[in-house]
Image (cartoon, coloured by chain):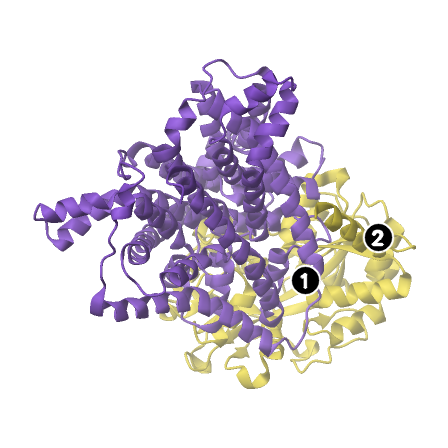
Chain colours: A purple, B yellow
Amino acid sequence: MSSPAAPQRSRATSSTQILERGDSTSGHSTATSHVRTTRGPTALTVASTAVALILLGPLVFLLVESSGAGAHQIARLIWRPLTATLLWNTVRLTVVVTVLCAIIGTLTAWCVERTDLPLRRMWAVLIVIPFAIPDFVIAFGWASLFTWVHGFEGAVLVMTLAVYPLVYLPVAASFRNADPGLEEAARSLGLGRLSTFFRVTLAQVRGAIFGGCVLVSLVVLAEFGAFEILGFRTFTTEIFTEFQLSFNIATACALSLVLILLSGLILGGDWIIRPKGRTARTGPLAQQSLRRHELGAARWPVLLTLLALVALSLGVPIGASIYWMARGTKFALGGVSILNAGLHTAFFGACAGAIATVAAIPVALLAIRHDSLKARLMERSTYLVLAMPGLVIALALSYFAERYAGGFGYQTSALLILAYSILFFPLALVGVRASIIHIPVGFEEAARSLGQSRRRAFLRVTMRIAGPGLAASFCLVFLATITELTATLLLVPINVQTLSTQFWAYQQNLSYGQAAPFALVIVLIAAVPSYVISRYFDRLPARATAGQ
Amino acid sequence: MVLVAAIMLSACGSSSTGSRGSITLYSGQHVQSTDALIAGFEKLTGITVNLRSNDEDTLADQMVTEGARSPADVFFTENSPVLQFLSGKGLLATLPSSTLARTSSAFNSPRGNWVGVSARVSVLIYNPKLIAKRQLPTSVLQLASPKYKGLLAVAPGETDVQPIIASVLHTYGHARAVAWLEGVKANASGHILANSESIANEVNRGEVAFALVNQYYWWRLRAEIGVSNVSSKIAYFAARDPGYVIDVSGAAVLRLSTHKAAARKFVAFLVSRAGQEIIAHSISFEYPLASGVATVQPETPFSQLQPNSITIPELGTGSPAIALLHEAGLL
C-alpha cells in the first residue's frame, strides 16, 4: 500500500515545520509569556496520556510480539540473504533521492524567492503541486508511458519528481524569513558573489534544507506503490510481499523492525545534528530592504529548466492519465464506481480528520500552556509515529485486533479510521498547535472572571478563535487519507473500495484505461485544496509578526 | 458531510442485501472470471455473494488466524497448494460426491474437501527481438544457466511460482533446488518483479527477454492491448519437463461456515455446466476442468498439453517453496 501514507503525512509536516519555525522565530516571545508553570489540569493530563498511549500502541505491540516470537527466530529472519539486498537498495535510493531533492528544492526556492524571475507567483504554485499528487500516480504515469522507467533509475527519477517540493516548501519559507542584510553585509565586506551564496545565503537556510531532507528520506523509506509499479524492492515492498505470503507476525515483525530502526535513525539524527542558531531577520522591518537578484540573460535558461521540471513532474502523470482514459479499456473489469469509492474515501477521511484533530487538542494545550518536561516528552513521543510507515501501523493493528481483541473491529471501517487517525496525528498536532499558540490565555481568564464556567470559557473563547486552524488541521488529515494506499489496502473492509484501492486494483491488472479516471479524480480533489491549505499555513507566521 | 456520506453509503449497502441469504467468498482468483461467476450464481439462485479479493496466501493465513470468527464460507483459489495447506489445518469441509464427480479425481482434493474448477499451464513468454526461440531453455533447470544472465524475469512473491518450485524440489531434491533458485536469482537480477502481470508486460515491451509464467497472462495481455501490439510469444518446455506444470484452481467450503448449504451451492455452481461455460468464455483464458466443457479461446487445447506427471499431493503446500525462496535470497 504504497504510497503510502507517510509521504502525505510527512509532506504535511513540512508546512508544520515552516510553522514551527515561524513560532520559534516570531511567536515565541508572546507564547512563553502565556505559559502557566503549574501542573496541567488532571483531565488534560489524562486525555493526553491516553492519546500518547494509543499512538505508541502499534510500536509497543510490535516490540512485544517480536520478543514473544523469540530473538532467535527474529534474528534468523533478519539475517537472511535478502536483507542485505534490501538494505543496499533502500539506503542508496534514499541517499540519491535526498541529495537530488535538496539541490532541486533549494535552487528552485532561491529562484522564486530571491530573484526577479518572471511569473514568480505562477511558478510558486506549479512547483508545489506535485506535492499533492500521490507518488503512485506519478509512477503510474511514467511507467505506463516509458518502458525504460523501472528499477533503480526509474525509482530515482519518479521519487525525485514526486517529493522535491518537500525541500522547496521549507526552504522557500526560510528564504522569506531570512535577513537579507547579512548578504549585503558580506558583499560589502568584499566576499564574491559565489562565496556569498555558499557561505551566507545557503547557511541561512541550511536548517530548512536539512528539515526537508529528513522528510524526503522518511517518505522514500515508507513508499510502497511507486516502487511496486517500478519493480524496485525496498523494505516496505518486501514487508508487504511477506504479509501477502504469510499472515505471520514473526516475519512481519522482522523486516518492520529494521525499517523502523532506519526511520528512527533519521529522526534521531535530525534532533541531534540539525543546525541551530538564529538566521531570521532581526526585526519585522528588516525584510523590506530585500533586493531581488537580477537574472539578466540567465532568465531564459532558468525559465526553460523550470518549465522542464513542471512538465516532468506534473505534465507526464496528468498527460498519461488523460491518454489512457482516451484510449479506454477493451475488456472492462468489475469494480465500484468513482462516486461509490469517492463517498467511502470521503467518509473515512472525514472521520479520521475529526478524530485526529480532537485528539490533538489536549496534547497541544498541555504542551503549550502547561509547559513541563513531562508535557514536552508526551508531545515529542507522538512524533515517534513518523518513524512508523503506514504499512507497519496497519500490520500491527490488524494483528492486534485479530489476536488480542477477539477479532473485534477486524476488517471494519472503525479499524481503518483508527489507523488513519494514528498515521496522520502528527499532521493534526502541528495544525492544532499552530492555531492555539497565538491565543493569549488571558482571553479565557477574562471570560471566566465575567462568570463563564471553565468549560464554557474554553469552548466559547479559545476554541472559537482556534476554529479556522482546527478546520485546516481537519483538512490536512482528510487530504492525507485520500492519497493513502498501503494501510488502506491492508485494512479496507470487505466489499469496500476507496479511490486509491480501486485505482490500485485496475492498475495491477494493467487495466490502465479504467485506472486513469481514478488517478485524475485523486489529483483533482487532493491537489487544489492542498495548495490552498499550504498557502494558509504559509501566511500564518507572517501575519502574526509583520502584519503582512 | 460525514452524515451525508454515511447515509448514502448505507443506501448503497442495503441495496446489495439479497432476500435469499448471502455467503462470503474469499477469492484469490482473478477478478475477470470471479465477477462473471458471481453474477451468474446470484442470478440463478438469488443468493448474494460478498467478495473479499486478495492474494490467496494472505486469505489462507487470515482464515487460520480468524479461526471460528472467520466470515468466510467459500474459498476460491488460483493454485492447489494453498487449499492443501488449509486442508492440512482441518479447516475445509468435505464436499458432496456429486460435486467432486464433476472433475477428474486427478484435479481434486485427495481427501475430497476441495474440487478443481479450472487450470492453467506454465509457459515461457519471450520477446523474439531479444531472444530467438531456439535459444530458449527446453528444461526448467536451464533457467539457472549463466548464459541467460540479464535475460530472465521472475516474480518470487507470486503464488503461481510455488507449484513450479515444488515440482523442481520433488524431482531434483533440496540441494539442487536451492542451487537452481540461486542461479535464477542471479540471472533475473534487475528484473525481480511484483507479479506475473508486470512480467508479461515487461517482456512484451522488450524490457527483458523471457520469463516463466502461466499461459493466461500472455493471452490476457494479448486481448487487452490488441493482437497488433503484441511483440511477445509463448513457448513450452520439452514434454513432461518438471517445469511444465498444470496449476489447478479449486474451491472449498469452510468447515466452520455458518451458511454451508448456500456455500455448497456456490461450489457446485462453479463446476456446473453453467459455471464452466462462463470460465470457457471468460477472458481469464483458464481451462475449464469439469467434464464436457472446453475453452473457446484460440489457445492450445487442454488435451494436447504434455505436462509433468506430478500429482496434487506431491505438489503439497506452499511452505517448502517459500522456505526455498528464503534460502536462495529471493524472498
Q: Is residue B311 above or below residue B207?
A: above
Label 1 sits on a secondary structure element that is helix
From the image, tell me which residue sits under label 2. Answer: B14
Above/below status of A83 relative to A442: below
Q: Which residue is mark 1?
A: A338
Measured from the top left, where is residue B237 in percent x and y?
53, 74
Q: Secondary structure at mark 2?
A: helix
Residue at 26 percent across and 68 percent down: it is A299
In the image, farthest residue toward the bottom: B228
Marker count (numbered): 2
Q: CA distance from mark 1 to mark 2?
A: 19 Å
Residue A162 place in picture, x, y as percent: 43, 58
Q: Nearer the viewer, residue B167 or B6?
A: B6
Relative horizontal placement of residue B61, taking residue B69 as reference (left or right): left
- What chain does badge 2 belong to? B
Badge 1 amino acid: Ile
Please report contact status of discs 1 and 2: CB closer than 8 Å, yes or no: no
